[in-house]
Image: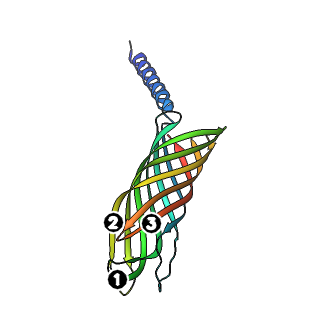
Amino acid sequence: MNRHERYRARSLRAAAAGVLLSVGLAAHATDFTLGFGAGADRGKTDCVDGFACDHSSAHGKLFLNYRLDEAWDLQALGFAGSRFKGGDTTDDGTTFGGSFRVDALGLAAGYRVPLAPDWWLRGQLGVAAVRTRFSYAAPFEGDVSKTQAQPLAGLSAGYAIAPGWLLSLDYDFTRFKVHSTRGSLHLLGLSAQMAF
């Protein structure tokens, strides 16, 4: 076999390996979905006299889904940016106001139901490590933070706009705690997702 034939044989083997690799990757092309989104949220806290109470905020979200089969998947997600104002009461009854910031990392199992061609509905349940930081308003100053495991639930309605690209309207719910304040956090947003 001369040099030209050896080169052609190597090229054919490389091309065949490339085709097999492409087929293998295509077979798993929809196993993972990377998504990012943003939207409005509402954090419910107590209000105190003499301090403005604001439960509305905005958030950003990043998530990675791994499909176990046609219906079930696992989602790792994080969201940040939820900031709102409220109040708390000390053990001796002193009330104070301040600002809350809530961030979370979570893991959830999801179940997807096809509704129509290119449309689907997905529900999920899981747990999140929710970090809440409370910054005291004057005259107290300073801040306190707490990270706690909290339940995580969600519902999404999605549409496949193109092969491998999805848009969804997402609702997520969790809870938070800092000092003696417990509250609920509701997030509603739009997400773009890419399958790979």
Q: Residues within 10 Å of mark 3 (few under 14, many from 20)?
A: few
Residue type marked 3: Gly
Residue type marked 2: Lys
Residue linked to disc 3: 183
Could you tell me which secondary element the residue under label 1 belongs to?
Answer: loop
Query: In the figure, 43 relative to 25: above or below?
Result: below
Residue linked to disc 2: 146
In the rendered structure, are the residues bearing label 1 and label 3 in contact, judged by CB atoms less than 8 Å apart?
Answer: no
Q: Earlier in the sequence, mark 2 or mark 1?
A: 1
Q: Residue most toward the front?
A: 92
Q: Position of residue 11 (x, y in %)?
A: 44, 23
Question: Which quadrant of the rendered structure holds the N terminus?
Answer: top left
Could you tell me which secondary element the residue under label 2 belongs to?
Answer: strand
Asked whether the viewer can see residue 33, the reply is yes
Could you tell me which secondary element the residue under label 3 belongs to?
Answer: strand
Q: Residue most toward the top?
A: 1
CA–CA distance in space, label 1 to label 3: 22 Å
Residue linked to disc 1: 141
Report the mark closest to the observer, 3 or 2.
3
Q: Position of residue 82 (x, y in %)?
A: 47, 66
